[in-house]
């Protein structure tokens, strides 16, 4: 997707293609559940509240056109496990 924009004399985008990113939060704790920008989405999973009171992320997944393109999972006591595909 090609995005174009026109700018006013102050350098502020004044028109062009409108792009909106949607953020979804968990109503119970306010943590970010995911985002959507066109055909690109991502999602976040967190450790349960008792395991981590700091909102520690357990899993992150990114998708394009409903196909998973990136995923990382935190394994207890280890560095994040990275899976691309």
Image (cartoon, helix red, strand yellow):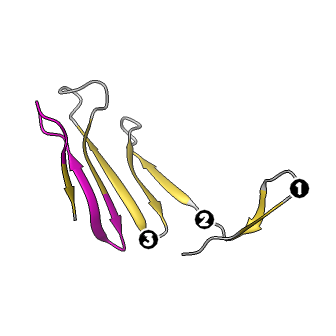
Q: Nearer the viewer, mark 1 or mark 3?
A: 1
Q: Quadrant of residue 17?
A: bottom right
Q: Residues within 10 Å of mark 2 (few under 14, many from 20)?
A: few
| Magenta stretch bounds | 62-81
Q: Quadrant of residue 69?
A: bottom left
Q: Is residue 63 magenta?
A: yes
Q: Is residue 1 magenta?
A: no
Vertical relation: 19 (above or below) 81 = below
Rendered-image quadrant of the N terminus = bottom right
CB atoms at circles 2 and 1 under 8 Å apart?
Answer: no
Looking at the image, which residue sits at the far right?
9
Q: For marks 1 and 3, give the CA distance.
A: 32 Å
Tell me which label, 2 or 3, sits earlier in the chain: 2
- Residue 4, percent from left and from top: 68, 70
Q: Is residue 13 left or right of residue 59?
A: right
Residue assigned mark 2: 19
Residue assigned mark 1: 9
- Residue 25, percent from left and from top: 42, 45
Q: Is residue 19 left or right of residue 49?
A: right
Numbered circle sitting on residue 28: none
Q: Residues within 10 Å of mark 3 (few under 14, many from 20)?
A: few
Callout count: 3
Element marked by disc 2: loop
Tell me which label, 1 or 3, sits earlier in the chain: 1
Which of 28 and 43 lies nearest the eye of the viewer? 43
Q: Nearer the viewer, mark 2 or mark 1?
A: 1
Vertical relation: 69 (above or below) 72 = below
Rendered-image quadrant of the C terminus = bottom left
- Residue 72, percent from left and from top: 23, 49
Residue assigned mark 3: 39
């Amino acid at each position: 997707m090609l995005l174009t924009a026109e700018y006013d004399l102050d350098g502020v985008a004044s028109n062009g293609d409108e792009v909106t990113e949607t953020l979804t939060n968990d109503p119970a704790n306010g943590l970010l559940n995911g985002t959507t920008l066109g055909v690109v989405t991502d999602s976040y999973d967190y450790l349960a509240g008792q395991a981590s009171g700091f909102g520690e992320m357990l899993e992150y997944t990114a998708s394009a056109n409903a196909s998973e393109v990136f995923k990382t999972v935190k394994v207890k006591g280890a560095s994040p496990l990275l899976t691309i595909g």
